[in-house]
Image: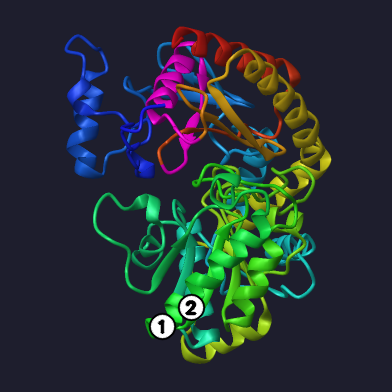
Amino acid sequence: MSAHRSKPTTRPILDMNAYDARDAKPDDPKNDLLARRQRNFGAASVLFYRDPIEMVSASGCWMTAADGTSYLDFYNNVPSVGHCHPRVVAAMTDQAKKLNINSRYLHQTTEEYLDRLKATFPDHLENIVLTCSGSEANDLALRIAQRASGARGIIVTESAYHGNTATVTEISPSAHKRGDLPDHVVVVPPPGSLAYGDDIAAGFADAVHDAAKTLIDRGHGVAALIVDSIFSSDGVFSNPRGFLRLAVAVVHRAGGVFIADEVQPGFGRTADAFWGFLRHDVMPDIVSMGKPMGNGFPMAGIAVRSDLLAAFCEDVGYFNTFAASPVASATGLAVLNVIADENLQANAGVCGAYLRDGLQHLADQDGRISDIRGAGLFLGVDLSADGNPENPSGQLVADVINAMRRHRVLIGAAGKYGQTLKIRPPLCLSHNEVDFFIDALGKSLRARG
């Protein structure tokens, strides 16, 4: 290998597979719609694909565009029980016809939902606070952690994404296009073999220890270690099971709390546990959740130790106008019922194993697949032009993603360099749909051969 190999380019999360208006096609019939989008959203407009898609409907694992093309959705973990699931839509609609109001009134469905949701957590997480977005949930979690610890410092992984409030953007390295992180935020490499060799648990714990020492030396102290429990934005890191235990012990000894961000891996997606942190046999002080919680309805929240919440509420109250409404509660309850009644967590295990087998078969044929990681129906597939995992190729991933779109499959990217195909289809996925995906990926890789 050349000693002068160029260093791969770090890619902010919103730049991965993003539409660039400079690539607009003059004769594209969507130009008027695109122009309106740019006028309305301005610089904050983010669209997928070099040629954006106008979507009009969806059902199960499939989405339909305005031109009639149907796409297999391997990207969106928000509609986790399936796009427009009839039971979820019915629950939402029926409750909206009766009553929808803020949470300062008693309502049977709200308490039924919270009791059902609490039953999925360890007993020490006694309280639930609902919000409307994962960003709000993580913002609240950080505020509670800083109050509980009396410290300000936060430890995160180097390509983490935890949301977009002012506070949470500060601890989301993958959201930053320029500039350094604030002094009270220290990053550690994600828990993979490239960073830590064969002993990921010890290596990751040592990195957290060093980060804690840095925060203490800077005068901030340690408020929290916050991780997405499958490290999705970092490129998906799930194994070995239990590797988080040592790092959590380190942050507790430093006086901080452990926040498990379950916004992406939660609600049965990892198959062998309802929550990603349970795969590691750790006890979080706070758990944040969101995205799949309402299957598209804006729901999120935290599960938290009651003593931490009580201490926080001594200083400031918390109220959310739209969270914990009767419609939100009915919708969230329907999602829990569908996951249970349709055995979707088990399906994530069965279809996830079948999917991994298909990916491994492709890897045996194509050396550019340099690694396959993940659990259940949350997988990451690294691509490298020369097969060396130390030479990640975000460009190859971007080309494959756009080629897969031509083969009617939607998929995303992750990782520091955008080198990872991020796979997270709805939990109602079938074996036939896995076959469709594997066929499309094989064709897309061959097209880039």
Circle 2 residue: 213
Alpha carbon distance from label 1 to label 2: 6 Å
Q: Is residue 264 above or below residue 119?
A: above
The picture quadrant where one finds residue 391 is: top left
Q: Is residue 397 above or below residue 403?
A: below
Q: Could you say which disc has been placed on residue 201 in the image?
A: none
Image quadrant in which the N terminus is located:
top left
Query: Where residue 142 appears, x then y in whole percent?
Result: 49, 72
Q: Residue at x 53, y 91 (%)?
A: 314
Q: Secondary structure at mark 2?
A: helix
The magenta stretch spans residue 405: yes
Q: Nearer the viewer, residue 343 or 98?
A: 343
Apparent side of residue 47 relative to residue 414 in the rendered image (left or right): left
Q: Residue at x 16, y 12 (%)?
A: 26
**Which residue type carries mark 1?**
Asp
Q: How is the image coloured?
A: rainbow
Question: Is residue 27 visible to us here?
Answer: yes
Q: Residue at x 45, y 19 (%)?
A: 400
The picture quadrant where one finds residue 170 is: bottom left
Mark 1–mark 2 CB contact (< 8 Å) = yes
Q: Nearer the viewer, residue 322 or 40?
A: 40
**Which residue type carries mark 2?**
Lys
Query: Where residue 264 appears, x then y in whole percent?
Result: 58, 48
Query: Where residue 113 appears, x then y in whole percent?
Result: 72, 60
Magenta stretch, residue numbers: 390-416
The magenta stretch spans residue 426: no
Circle 1 residue: 217
Residue lying farthest to the bottom in this orientation: 314
Q: Secondary structure at mark 1?
A: helix
Query: Where residue 299 appears, x then y in whole percent?
Result: 55, 55
Q: Is residue 419 above or below residue 124?
A: above
